[in-house]
Amino acid sequence: MKRMDCLILCLIVLAAPAIAAELNVGDAAPDFELQGSDGKSYRLSDLKGKAVVLAWFPKAFTGG
């Protein structure tokens, strides 16, 4: 029975992004936290009122 509980929990975790509310153009971004390349964590709400640019790459240190 524990295996089934684990499977159900995994499915819930994987489905969570699909359950989240849809964002539309002009909506405020939800708060989130990401780790920067400097190893520090940054929370969007701490940067309120400042310009924020997110850049990511499919592989580390590549141009795309």
Image (cartoon, grey):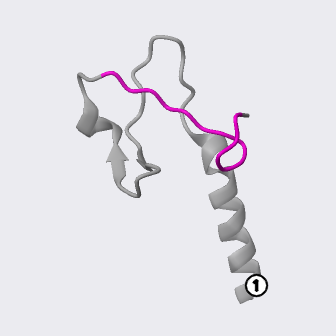
Q: Quadrant of the N terminus?
A: bottom right
Question: Residue 60, image x and y in percent?
Answer: 66, 50
Membership of 28 in magenta stretch: no
Q: Nearer the viewer, residue 47 or 15?
A: 47
Which residue is pictured at 73% across the width and 34% down the height? 64
Mark 1 lies on residue: 3
Question: Residue 34, image x and y in percent?
Answer: 44, 48
In terms of image quadrants, where is residue 6? bottom right
List the single residue furthest toward the bottom.
Answer: 1
Which residue is pictured at 37% across the width and 38% down the height? 31
In terms of image quadrants, where is residue 44? top left
Q: Which residues are magenta?
A: 51-63
Q: The residue tagged with tag 1: helix, strand or loop?
A: helix
Q: Which amino acid does the dot numbered 1 rest on?
A: Arg
Question: Residue 43, image x and y in percent?
Answer: 33, 44
- Image height of 51 relative to 16, above or below: above
Q: Does residue 29 appear left or right of residue 20 in this picture?
A: left
Dominant secondary structure (helix, strand or loop) of the stretch shown in magenta: loop
Which residue is pictured at 68% across the width and 51% down the height? 15
Q: Does residue 18 appear left or right of residue 48 in this picture?
A: right
Membership of 59 in magenta stretch: yes
- The residue carrying pointer 1 sits among few (fewer than 14), some (14 to 19) or many (20 or more) residues within 10 Å by Cα, namely few
Which residue is pictured at 27% across the width and 23% down the height? 50
- Image height of 7 relative to 26, above or below: below
Question: Residue 16, image x and y in percent?
Answer: 61, 50
